[in-house]
Amino acid sequence: MKYYSTNGKAPIADLHKAVVKGLAEDRGLYMPEEIKKLPKAFFDDIQDMKFQDIAYNVASAFFGEDVDLDALKDIVYDTLSFDCPVVEVKENIYSLELFHGPTLAFKDVGARFMARLLQYFIRQEANHQQVNVLVATSGDTGSAVANGFLGVEGIHVYVLYPKGKVSPIQECQFTTLGKNITAIEVDGVFDDCQALVKNAFMDEALNQHMKLTSANSINVARFLPQAFYYFNAYARMKALGKADQLVMCVPSGNFGNICAALFGHAMGLPIKRFIAANNANDVFYNYLQTGRYEPKASVQTLANAMDVGDPSNFARIYDLYGKSHERISSLISGATYSDDQIRETMRQCYLDTKYILDPHGACGYQALADGLQAGEVGVFCETAHPAKFKEKVDNILGIDVEIPDRLAAFMKGKKQSVPMTKDFSDFKAYLMKQ
């Protein structure tokens, strides 16, 4: 499979280059030249298949030309050591619980898959030069990537996060690990962290000094495996006899997760339509209404992992549908919610159903409650365990959310982080010393 850049000015790449390099030379995002349709027989039998088997079929269509199939199967089965159940919250609204992985967030699958795939390609190289992974995080990406890559030989990870703008539990999941993980605490917002990462990839001197790649959803190996979730959701809903008019709602920040879902749809996944649920960072919502994409500075909200003012993966969605606003808006609708609306949704859902939403899942749940049409069944992504936002959830619901043992273990560690300004020259100077 060959990969081209969304900006159209970079050389065509193979999967090895797309994964190891991360970002194309023209600052565009890599896109596969072809998206293969999965056979009808796969969808006919999908309800009887295990999550790992479903994922292997999907991964084979994405990566099977470029990765030995036995190795790919090992990567998939190692990545998916847990399940992601569908839970009924209220009539015709279901939660796809994506928080049963090691860091209790949906990004665990993409991070672990990429770590194993990157290691596979490194071992094929003659010089085995260390690869340095740069990742910007607004919350869950950092913890998922740090834990997915922890101890992986030949790879060092630098996690850039905005000072004071991730939850305490999220922060401890990537600042207490040590080993091959370095946390960079940036005095700015997520968009500043993302800009530092992108500028690093484009800096010639820095790239001569060290081999760089990204584990953000700009990397094809990070975002594509998230498509596994949506095939699994369809399988579980089909087993319940509720897959005929299925609507998927995805809380969206950098748009990697919904982008993976849309790739699944292009492969034949029979989802009727999609909803992108935003917090107050409503750039994509406004695009759907107006046809104009106008990035702006992000604002801090209760749903901090979605605080993105210029979502990278919009470029992939725009490219996937031939830059057609009509095609995009006919398949995807949007919703946007203020902090007060998020709080009210969390309270009302808990009062009505006893289901505990985190602030991100609350956006998805409310978008379905507001937007489902007659005969439709909706599934929203509950992207992280509510205990990851314990202070917010406890305060809003007046309860004491139990902290799972895995999270409690992180909280016992000692914070280790490197303070950094949002000035690229300072970040570059730091990396040049490494």
Image (spheres, helix red, strand yellow):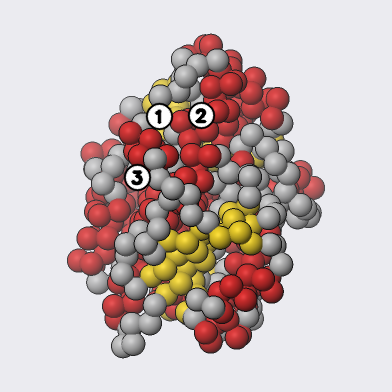
Cα separation, mark 1 vs mark 3, equals: 14 Å
What amino acid does circle 1 point to? Ile
Mark drawn on residue 271: none
Which of the two discs, 2 and 1, labels the residue nearer the N terminus? 2
Q: Secondary structure at mark 1?
A: loop
- Left or right of residue 101, residue 184 in this image: right
Find out whether the residues at labels 3 and 2 contact each other: C-beta distance under 8 Å: no
Q: Residues within 10 Å of mark 3 (few under 14, many from 20)?
A: some
Front one among 362 and 224? 362
Vertical placement of 245 versus 354: above or below?
Answer: below
What amino acid does circle 3 point to? Pro
Mark drawn on residue 390: 2
Residue 222 occupies quadrant = bottom left
Which of the two discs, 1 and 3, labels the residue nearer the N terminus? 3
Find out whether the residues at labels 2 and 1 contact each other: C-beta distance under 8 Å: yes
What residue is shown at x 44% (from left), y 34% (from top)? 385
Residue marked by disc 3: 102
